[in-house]
Image: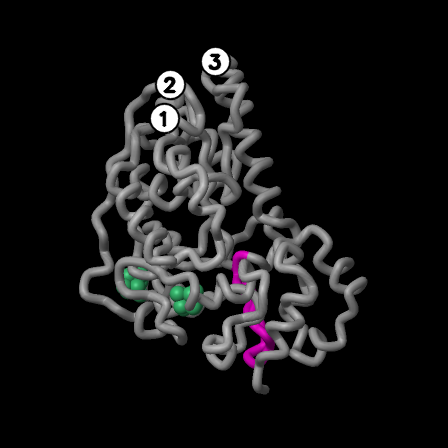
Amino acid sequence: MRNFIKQKAKELGFDACGIAEACFLEDDAAFLKHWLSEGNHADMHYLERNFEKRTNPQVLVPGTKSVVVVLLNYFPEKTQPSNAPRIARYAHSEVDYHVVIKQMLAELETCIISNYGENIVNKEAQHSFVDSAPVLERRWAQRAGLGWLGKHTQLIAPGIGSYCFIGVLMLNAEMEYDTPLPDRCGTCTRCIDACPTNALNGKSLDARRCISYQTIENKKSVADDIQSKLSNCALGCDICAEACPWNIKWAKANNNLKLKPVSEIYTFQKAHWQALSNDEFNSIFKKSAIKRAGYNKIKENIGFMSE
Ligand code: SF4
Ligand code: SF4
């Protein structure tokens, strides 16, 4: 079953697939509790909810025995003009990655069901996930042998780097599991040193100081003490990822047609963004993840830029 799933994941276009035993994440539960108690999650109060489900897959999806984790490389071929407001690479595709991965996971599930029967999944509960449910995707990817969690808190997958989406499928069958990989950050601190807002401390991330949170999730304006440190980031931030030597070594352009980028991202300068109407924004980015942040938020973020 393990080999079948990995083979199908590859055929469907995923860049990597690993499988972990579905167990209570005891260490992660303690870590998460402490991280939340320090207020590192800023206004993302949804992270306080569903604590049991978040740390125990058997509570989230009753009957789960195995957690299948897939990766999809999203590193784009092109780069933005050097002075343009920066859009994090995860959001460059025409179609929102949630939609892309969900469809691919559904195809993988269909293959698995056709070979092993309907009872392999819990049809009563949502059992496939991409960045939208109480699932610690990065931890599961690490447990499934797909990489390690760098000091920038992202998954670093050998041969891919950290520019990858993570999808999760929970199954009701036991199988042979993958072995977690060792941490290969060593004494490196490049991501910590590169972060313009000191959001990283080597073990965790303070979302209150993170440009990604401030430019996307924060429904209010970017915090006063971060506004002057946005480093031209209009939506999200890749600065720590760009500093990582493993990304410099491994990140390669994806050639996935499902992640075809929005062409304007590579032509728009600040003046284009400033002149963009709400209707034009909705037309250009109609299926894009950029729409999740919203027109007003991006325009406001760009307004904080000095040049
Ligand atoms: S995403 Fe940007 S702001 Fe957040 S930790 Fe990385 S470098 Fe710092
Ligand atoms: S920059 Fe260095 S410390 Fe940070 S994630 Fe990469 S290897 Fe690890």
Q: Is residue 291 above or below residue 55?
A: below
Q: Tell which circle, 2 or 1, labels the residue nearer the N-terminal end.
A: 1
Main SS, magenta residues: loop
Q: CA distance from mark 2 to mark 1?
A: 6 Å
Q: Which residue is mark 3?
A: 119
Q: CA distance from mark 2 to mark 3?
A: 9 Å
Q: Is residue 99 left or right of residue 193?
A: right
Residue 182 in the image, given as x and y percentages of width and height: 21, 48
Q: Which residue is mark 2?
A: 173
Q: Is residue 302 left or right of residue 2?
A: right
The residue at 69%/66% (across/down) is 296
Magenta highlight range: 76-90
- Is 80 contained in the magenta span? yes
Q: Quadrant of the N terminus?
A: top left
The residue at 52%/64% (across/down) is 236
Q: Which residue is mark 1?
A: 66
The amino acid at mark 2 is Ala
